[in-house]
Image: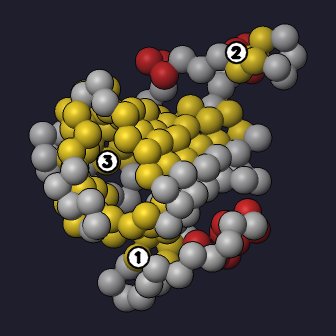
Amino acid sequence: MDAVTTKGSQIADTHSHLVRPESMEWQKTRFPGCEAKTLLFDRATGLMTALMRFAPGAVLPDHEHVNIEQTYVLQGSLVDKEGPAQGVECKAGEFIWREPGSRHVAWCPEGGLMLAIFQVPNRFFEADGRVVDAAGQDWDETWGHTGVADRETR
């Protein structure tokens, strides 16, 4: 398991890992206006916990939550721009979770800061028909090993 921690942050050998987000740099993503601080990432399973920061008007394009996704909004709001829950808005201090197989386009009209927990990375649907992860890598090649049953939503 990869945890974004310094060696000195491990407590009691490998039982507890202290992460100090305030000392971490924001990492740009391939999505304009979206940055992340990865707090926990398990390469074997795809489990990830991250702080996500969105500039006003930033959009997360068409994607599917392969397994349960959880988001707690710290600042701003997260809105379903397209999809079955179009118009649903999660505001600061609110929590939203999405079922496996849910698909939508999300955006932050006024920007936002969120704590997001993914059990398996999202599938992003590109205009050319490719299905990729957030890094732009082929989803099946990169995450097919996780054993998640294919939920055809294309």
Q: Does the rendering let one see residue 73?
A: yes
Dot in front, 3 or 1: 1
Q: Secondary structure at mark 2?
A: helix
Q: Secondary structure at mark 1?
A: strand
For residue 12, the mark is none
Q: Residues within 10 Å of mark 2 (few under 14, many from 20)?
A: some
Query: Which residue corresponds to the image point at 68% horizontal and 72% vertical from the top-left?
Result: 149
* Mark 2, residue position: 9
In the image, farthest residue toward the bottom:
128
Distance between mark 2 and mark 3 Cα atoms: 27 Å
Of the residues under marks 1 and 2, which one precedes in the sequence?
A: 2
Of 44 and 25, nearer the camera is: 44
In the image, farthest residue toward the right:
13
Query: Which residue corresponds to the image point at 12% horizontal and 40% vertical from the top-left?
Result: 110
Query: Which residue corresponds to the image point at 75% horizontal and 18% vertical from the top-left?
Result: 16
Horizontally, is 151 left or right of 2 in the view? Answer: left
Residue 51 in the image: above or below residue 46? above
Of the residues under marks 3 and 1, which one precedes in the sequence?
A: 3
